[in-house]
Amino acid sequence: MLPALLLPLLQAQAQQPPAPPRRSVPDSGVVTFEQRVTPAGVQSVFNGRVAAVRFGINPGEIWVGAPGGAYRLSWRENRVIASARFDGTPGVHGIAIDRTGGHALFSTVGRRPEDVAATIPGAQRPRAPSVSQVFAYDATGAVPRRAGGDDSAAVAFNVNRLGDYMSGGLAVASRANAAGRRVVVLPLPANDRVEVLDAASGARLATIPTGVLPVAAVVADDGSEAWVSVYGGPKPRPGERQAPQQDGYARAEPVRVDPRGIAREGYAARLDLVAGRVTDSVPVGRHPGAMAWDLARHRLYVPNANSDSVTVVDTRERRRIGGFAIAPFRERKAGLAPTSAALAPDGATLYVTLGGVNAVAVYDVSRGDAAAALRGLIPTGWYPSTVDVSPDGRTIAVGTLLGVGSGEGRVGGRDGRNALAARGSANVIAVPTEAELLAYTTSVAQNVRLHLASGDGAPAALAPRANVAARAVPERPGEPSRIHHVVFIIRENRTYDQVLSDLDRGARDSTLLMYGRDVTPNAHALAEQFVTLDHFFATGGNSADGHHWLTQANETDYPMWPLYYGRSYPSESSDPLAYSSGGFLWEAAESKGRSVRVFGEFAPPPSDSLPAVRRRLLDAYRDRSSHGAAWFRAELRKMYDTRSSIPSLDKVLVREYPGWTQESPDVAKADVILEHLKEWEAAHRMPNLVMVILPSDHTVGTSPGWNTPKAMVADNDLALGRIVEGLSHSSFWNDMAVLVVEDDAQNGVDHIDGHRTVALVASPYARRGVVDSTFYTQQGMVKTIELMLGLPA
């Protein structure tokens, strides 16, 4: 129970309603998946990522969970019936409609009561980042509007202090179980447990431990049993292959991995809600999400976002009976990301959200076994992640994490478009006729520029052609290239306007300039002497996104939600749950016999980042010329021994080059690269793929005891210039391409879009002195590398 003195504070805070959604958004952001977005149905746009959408008790109503608020909408009338502000974000898949009790149940993550008190002058500072809780709002409209405020969704009860960092997708029974309790089942992803609550009062009835990261629940009508998707599977046993999550995070733990270092499959756990324990664990695919339960046929449908499949479980026999692959297209076999599922009331149609292609897949499951037939696809907003079906089966509701793209934000005292200003959406869509579904399906295929697997006349896979002249960038994978060496340099967090808006060319807004020619002369020289790419976009919104796009050309749902709170910040190889089952760029290179060396990219940061390390490094850097390169590298090996839990990455890492750190200036890192270049020259052999992390342009802001931001960006630019100078004067230059990109653009604003960033190219085959305004993205740059080196996409 909350302290009595804090209740008025919480209630006063809740008086102001959350920002209302918008039906029309004239300034849609750039969809950096390089896809068009043409959502079907009626759309409402919210500030932040929409975590859940559910149909209400009354016809024509939906409930939506978005950061900071719960919304009860009349979607036909485009009207907010009621809303309530909560301090934090909604849980993953975090809404359940209690039709028996007349409530809309929201799982959320917000500040602890003492943290709310800390906003009052003289109060104690916050002691913890977040707390999981459940709100029960009146969902009938029978409770009158609360007097004295605009916040009109009446709270029936609020259960606080359930867990921390995250809340999952809860479920509620419609009847009491054998213990006489009507229950709510709430997974707590960061705490590896499930809380069972009383549906009428919120009283805690039981705590049930699970494996790694339980995400979403479904419950039997009579409250006797529940099934929970356990994202990371069982906790590792002694001797089992495993890898740690990022050290230093409160909820980090070991995770089972396959021989590649990627997290293994999850499972569906059966909970006996009377006994309060897990009775069965049924293996499913990687990253199971929000499930759909056909109670009449005893069939549980489990979407697996990192396996691109749906597993079917017989809940009566408590075993896996099969499943089906999500494969609507001929070309694309990975990254479709089925994140959630919902079943029509008659059990004949299954709806599955496909986050990777902005669509809902419609499956015929009327046979009631493990078979399913794809009927078609429905277009949605950007990255659908939650779906529901109306009680009459005539309408579906879809929530998206990124919706219409990013909007306006304020960073570094400047206003503009920012990558982190997400605008998720909720779409209500009439279940289409067969003719409408055919048109929708065609629209989805055109939006993602792929051919339907069931279509006629689609081209076969583009095999390499014989006797084709070599080009710098071949048209098809495996055709000859004039490029034999690619140097891929990854920097940190800048928008185009922040750095290059003082050029006399290209799309620019110089009022947003922060690190112009006086700070970054080498970036400017490369953009002017070669090609100015003024419409290049970073797909990731932050480092936990961006490095995955650059190393895997894919991002799983794990950082999309995100699901890593309390466990890691997976911008490096520090969390096996973040890795795509499709593998990594260096693996693709080695599979085709290409040699690889990686200078720090995607490697964990050094464990020792004390100022003493920086002082020792400075001393060694000053003495390197008198002692020689070998001495300097030996000194670096005393400070850094870079390792990764990903076996394929670990064997190509340069040990003395650190992973992501700003303790070591980029100019010192550049010297390490140039020393290796001397060795390659002496051996007359250079790796085909060289990956480099240069992170100093991230800066540490105005933190005391550090360099100023301009000094750190200048350090990064000087290092870049020295590396390109060394490479361009080497014997390998005639068949080389240097590609430079930022991992994301989150630390700045831009006048076109918050994802627009700095990308540079240097090569004998690069265009000279031109502006190329073609729409390019990070995954397009990875594809270009793949084509040049003859790798599979």
Image: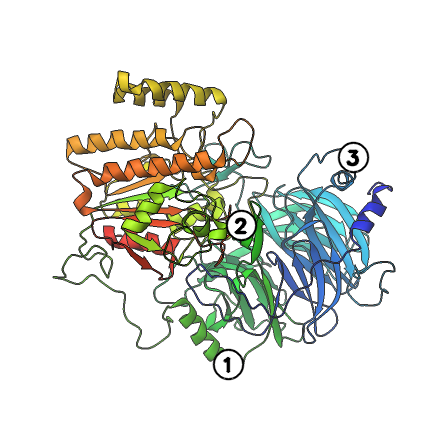
Cα distance in 3D space between marks 1 and 2? 36 Å
The quadrant of the picture occupied by the C terminus is: bottom left
Describe the element under mark 1 as helix, strand or loop: helix
Instruction: Give me the residue at 81% from left, 68% from top.
Output: 141
Q: Position of residue 540 (x, y in %)?
A: 47, 51
Cα distance in 3D space between marks 3 and 2? 44 Å
Q: Position of residue 753 (x, y in %)?
A: 49, 57
Q: Nearer the viewer, residue 401 or 674?
A: 674
Cα distance in 3D space between marks 1 and 3? 59 Å
Earlier-in-chain disc, 1 versus 3: 3
Q: Which amino acid lies under the numbered mark 2 shown in the image of this protein?
A: Tyr
Q: Nearer the viewer, mark 1 or mark 3?
A: 3
Residue that extends furthest to the bottom in the rendered view of this protein: 435
Q: Is residue 218 visible?
A: no
Instruction: Give me the residue at 37% from left, 74% from top.
Output: 454
- Asked if disc 1 and disc 3 are in contact, CB closer than 8 Å, the reply is no
In the image: residue 478, left or right of residue 289: left
Q: Nearer the viewer, residue 650 or 695?
A: 695
Residue that extends furthest to the left in the rendered view of this protein: 467
The residue beneath circle 3 is 123
Q: Which amino acid lies under the numbered mark 1 shown in the image of this protein?
A: Glu
The residue beneath circle 2 is 267
